[in-house]
Image (tube, rainbow, N blue to C red):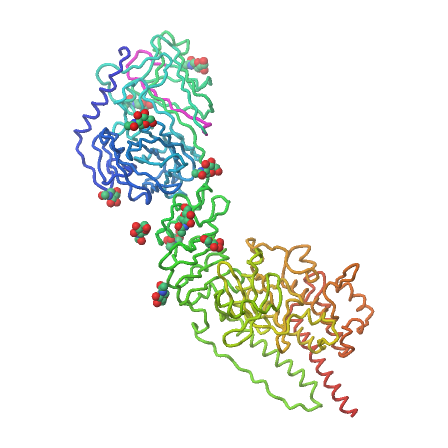
Amino acid sequence: MEGPRLSSSSLLFWLAVCMLSLAPNKLVLGLDPNNPGYISIDCGALNNYTNPDLQIYYETDDGYIDSGEKKQVSSDDMGKGFRASAKTLREFPDGVRNCYTIPPTTTTSNKGSTKYLIRASFYYGNYDNQNRTMKFDLYIGVNYWTTVDFSDPGSYIHKEIIHVVPPTEDAIQVCLVNTGNGTPLISSLELRQLAGTMYPSDDQFPTLALHKRINMGNTAYESMFRHPSDLYDRLWDVDDTDDGGAQSWAWNGPSPPALNRTNDAYKVPRGVLETFIMMENSYDLSLFWKAHVPRASKWISYLHFAELEDVSSPREFTIYCNDVFLKTISLDYLVPITVPTNQFTSDIGFKFKFVTNSSSYVSSPPPIVNAIELYYLLDISTIPTDLNDVNAMKGTKRAYNVTNKSWQGDPCVPTNFTWDGVKCSTENPPRITSLNLSSYGLKGKIADALANLTALISLDLSSNQLTGPIPELLAKLPNLNILNLSGNNLTGPIPESLQKKIIDGKLELRVADNPYLCLEDSCKPKKKRNSFVVPVIAVGSGLIVILSIALAIIWTLLMKKGKGQEGTIKLKNRPFTYNEVLKITDHFKTVIGKGGFGMVCLGTLANSTNVAVKMLSQTSKQGRKEFQAEAELLMIVHHRNLVSLVGYCDDAKNMALIYELMENGNLRQHLSDQSCNAQVLTWNERLRIAIDAAQGLDYLHNGCKPPIIHRDLKTLNILLNKSMQAKIADFGLSKAFAAENDSNISTRPAGTPGYLDPEYQSSGSLNMKSDVYSFGVILFELITGHPAMIRSASCSIHILQWVTPIIERRDIHSIVDPRLAGKFSVNSAWKMVEIAMSCVPTTAVMRPDISHVLAELKECWAIEMASERSQVIMMRQKT
Ligand SMILES: *[C@@H]1O[C@H](CO)[C@@H](O)[C@H](O)[C@H]1NC(C)=O
Ligand SMILES: *[C@@H]1O[C@H](CO)[C@@H](O)[C@H](O)[C@H]1NC(C)=O
Ligand SMILES: *[C@@H]1O[C@H](CO)[C@@H](O)[C@H](O)[C@H]1NC(C)=O
Ligand SMILES: *[C@@H]1O[C@H](CO)[C@@H](O)[C@H](O)[C@H]1NC(C)=O
Ligand SMILES: *[C@@H]1O[C@H](CO)[C@@H](O)[C@H](O)[C@H]1NC(C)=O
Ligand SMILES: *[C@@H]1O[C@H](CO)[C@@H](O)[C@H](O)[C@H]1NC(C)=O
Ligand SMILES: *[C@@H]1O[C@H](CO)[C@@H](O)[C@H](O)[C@H]1NC(C)=O
Ligand SMILES: *[C@@H]1O[C@H](CO)[C@@H](O)[C@H](O)[C@H]1NC(C)=O
Ligand SMILES: *[C@@H]1O[C@H](CO)[C@@H](O)[C@H](O)[C@H]1NC(C)=O
Ligand SMILES: *[C@@H]1O[C@H](CO)[C@@H](O)[C@H](O)[C@H]1NC(C)=O
């Protein structure tokens, strides 16, 4: 051993380099066979090459990134030795976040995780002749890593972490984030797989960011050790710290015999261990580093020791870290050891003390330190997006060659970098719930990868140039609620499975402006329609009652037959442009009503059919959803007692639904019309209306699978056509029954006071029986002529509160609408009251199914018919 010597270590380095250049170069392009677990990317390089000094194979970065531009530095001092990879760089003038995506090599540890040393290097080299300074952020995946600060344009910056890639991630992403302080750039990216036993190996492996890795005792800048001296290609910095008066030393004389590395996982290069610091004749060595790293709160350090002199008595000393006892060690000749510290906190720096035990003063040489590594723990608590979603988005990006600048790195997180058009849930890991690629210039087929986004609720592919059929696969997305395919050039029919979701009320599908898409029944082989010929019966007076009942039975049969037919989907309606809407309504000339959403105008189609055009007023925000819900339902639900949709208009600004015209308005207006010359609805008409409405509702409940709940049945929503046939309207609030258990669909309060199921009001649970309750209220309105809420100057009471005491008095003439002036059969009136009563128990389970109500009403109708006939007969007999 000799005194302080500054240049001995540099000699060692050059020796190492010489030996290297003698080694034969057997590296193969495309792989780095001599260095398994190495991935070396020379950013901006034009060719792959092997660096002979380092014996490392460098690849171009083409396969790892699809943004940025290649540049070459203007300084000539680059290009040699271990700085060769700094000669070129990639700059990122566009986009906030740009990411390298690196699939790890296949060798994984037993837990399926892979531990990597990841080093990013940056050299500006005045490549743009701007001599600029810059500052940008570096992210490892979705977590902040560090800030690269080029306050000196000449600096060569390395950032290094030790990071474990869990088996749930299939790629490492390194992202450069433009924070508005200059265009980011990068010179190289190097990954070195580490042994699982090196550095902490817990399950909860922390990501360690390197603060310093110092080759103690080496002050010569030209002798920075790395590969091939270091198996793991760590960069061992020169010792430029304040060593508190300690001197730098190097082991003297010819090389001692080989090191015993049996228990040495860290494999610190021999050259690094050959220098050290020590205070001559002192048994108390202190080291201090000032360190303030923003966002770093927990630290961990690795201290490396090796005795390369065969001393008579082993070196033995105790280590303190920030004044806390760490360990007492004894160095065995030629056996390197590494002592990790515990995790500790520090705001100002680290103090290490190495003290020889007083009992050992006489025999033990003074303490030494050969190398030190200082790391801080990175906060990597942000969890990346679900891997399947990430892969599906990558597949989508590839399928359509999406070059949007924001499509870099993780699709969802951090939230200020979420990809354009993507919306995510806040769960962990985040899921992609909405994808809006409207007007993205997408070409080709609808990508299969989209069907792998299994958490999607909304998918908007409108206004692109998509071709081919609508894939059946999309129906497999369990939560998909909105699918907008309008404005493309799709072909073929709408797949059955999607149609089913529409019927089930689970999906809103928009397909407008796909001229070759087939919405007609003609796409499918037509089902033969059974035609029932209702026999014309010559009515003899004596047989009338029997015949009437028989008619009712035939009618019931017909209805049952018809149901199957009407349950099949017919997308007969067609899209209208706003201009067409203007034309058919003659610029909204005739307003025939006003709905909850906006005005209703009279329209005339080219074939001179009159229609009602319901416009969604542009101020109605909430309305748009309900409006669309109604349109989607009406597109697929067809029944003679449901108002049918002729067409719709849905462009960015205007929405309109075009219905068959219901000339006679709504039922409420007929029941409340008090003017003397008004046509009072006859009892017979009221019965017919009740039966029509019950049929419509029966279709919704029992003809549709799963059942559809109307949710807002009321006399205002029962419309009458020219021949006084009643049809149910206003599907804005309707929901498919099966969807009700789906927590994704909010069950916001619905309906209208007076008609609302009391059980629903209190419990919020909604079922078909809620519609039955509303229907019962409608029956009472038909019977009494009163509205659901009877208002007087001072108060208002519910129709049930009003009618119940009168029913109890059994005063049928006070119950039935006085405007009928007694023109009804008492029997059928009582029957109707009974049916109505059966619909309105407070407890839902006590209410009958609408099919039962319908059957009862038909019976009631038969009674009425029989009674009318018998009256006619009686009158005849009188005359
Ligand atoms: C560089 O090597 C990679 C494989 O490691 C290969 O895909 C790529 O084509 C090569 N690039 C050039 C420019 O030879
Ligand atoms: C580049 O800028 C630095 C300060 O940022 C300055 O010291 C240096 O002289 C400049 N070099 C050139 C060539 O302009
Ligand atoms: C190497 O060191 C270990 C203990 O660390 C010891 O058991 C072993 O015998 C040593 N090997 C040699 C060849 O000295
Ligand atoms: C050295 O000193 C420390 C505390 O001062 C003590 O815990 C340790 O046992 C001592 N080691 C030996 C080998 O005496
Ligand atoms: C993808 O887009 C880029 C940039 O617009 C273009 O250069 C490239 O040729 C496109 N690739 C394909 C496969 O369409
Ligand atoms: C992203 O958001 C974080 C905190 O929400 C903020 O600190 C950071 O500056 C933002 N980054 C960019 C590039 O906007
Ligand atoms: C998709 O984005 C367009 C505008 O880019 C917007 O008009 C449309 O409403 C969005 N779709 C959905 C489902 O949010
Ligand atoms: C692409 O991304 C930018 C933001 O990065 C956004 O403003 C733009 O609307 C996006 N869409 C398309 C189709 O380019
Ligand atoms: C969808 O995901 C499965 C399973 O992850 C995968 O096998 C399949 O290739 C993916 N499909 C597409 C088109 O990406
Ligand atoms: C749309 O598709 C049809 C049939 O596949 C084709 O004839 C037509 O040219 C396409 N139109 C556009 C604008 O691509």
User: Furthest residue to the right?
Assistant: 809
Point out the image quarter for the C terminus: bottom right
Q: Position of residue 47 (x, y in %)?
A: 23, 40
Q: Quadrant of residue 306?
A: top left
The residue shown at (66%, 67%) is 716
Residue 617, compared with residue 394, is above or below; it is: below
Q: Quadrant of residue 184?
A: top left
Residue 360, compared with residue 335, is above or below; it is: above
Name the quadrant where ligand 4 sits: top left
Q: Position of residue 733 (x, y in %)?
A: 60, 61
Q: Quadrant of residue 795?
A: bottom right
Residue 217, compared with residue 464, is above or below; it is: above
510 and 452: which is toward the camera: 510
**Residue 616 in sight in this render:** yes
549 and 62: which is toward the camera: 62
Q: Is residue 809 left or right of residue 142?
A: right
Residue 490, compared with residue 822, is above or below; it is: above
842 and 651: which is toward the camera: 651
Magenta segment includes 209: no
Q: How many marks?
A: 0
Point out the image quarter for the N terminus: top left
Q: Position of residue 400 (x, y in %)?
A: 36, 54
Q: Is residue 610 left or right of residue 152?
A: right
Magenta segment includes 302: yes
Residue range in magenta is 295-315
Q: Is residue 558 left or right of residue 415?
A: right
Q: Position of residue 367 (x, y in %)?
A: 36, 14
**Residue 266 in sight in this render:** no
